[in-house]
Image: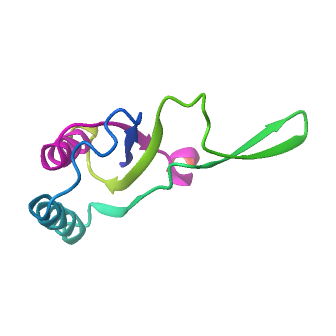
Amino acid sequence: MRFLMMTTDDSSSAGQNPPDEGMMAEMGRFIEEMSKAGVLLATGGLDPRPTRIESSGGKVTVTDGPYTEAKEVVVGFALIEVRTKEEAIELSKRFWQIVGDGKGVIHQVFGPEDLSGQ
C-alpha cells in the first residue's frame, strides 16, 4: 500500500521553530532508516506558491499562486510504501515527534494495479 504524507502550513507557525542541528540530524537518520528499509519512495519540500490548473467546459485556465483564499498549503511530502495504513500513521507520528508542532495529512495512493483489479 502506498501513502502520500503531506505537511501543511497555514502560516500561523511560520518561523516559530527553525530546525536546529539536532533535529536535522535526527531527521536524517529517520530518512536513512526508511530508505534502507525500502519504505521511503520519495520525499521533498514544495514551493508554497503553486500553479493552479483548472479545466471547465473545455477551457483550461492556469493561475500562479499564492492564493489569498487558501488557508493551508502543502509544503512537504513523503511517498511511502507500507503494508497497512496503521504503519503509515506510525511513521507519520515518528516524523512529528522529530519536528514538533505542525499539521499534515495522509492519503492512500492508488495506481494502475489498483484500478485493474490485479
User: For this view, does 22 lie left or right of residue 53?
Assistant: left
- Between 47 and 1, the residue placed more toward the observer is 47
Which of the 4 quarters of the picture holds residue 87? top left
Which of the 4 quarters of the picture holds residue 54? top right
- Between 58 and 27, the residue placed more toward the observer is 27
**Residue located 19% across and 69% down the image:** 32
Q: Residue furthest front?
A: 15
Total labels: the figure holds: 0
User: For this view, does 62 lie left or right of residue 102?
Assistant: right
- Residue 57 is situated, as x and y percent measured from the top left of the image, at 90, 33
Colour logic: rainbow
> Does 7 sit above or below residue 44?
above
- Residue 39 is situated, as x and y percent measured from the top left of the image, at 26, 60
- Between 39 and 23, the residue placed more toward the observer is 23
The residues colored magenta run 87-115
User: For this view, does 48 lie left or right of residue 15?
Assistant: right
**Residue located 36% across and 64% down the image:** 41
> Does 107 sit above or below residue 28?
above
Assess whether residue 53 is covered by the magenta stretch: no
- Residue 21 is situated, as x and y percent measured from the top left of the image, at 13, 65
User: For this view, does 30 lie left or right of residue 113?
Assistant: left
**Residue located 17% across and 63% down the image:** 24
**Residue located 56% across and 53% down the image:** 112
- Between 68 and 112, the residue placed more toward the observer is 68
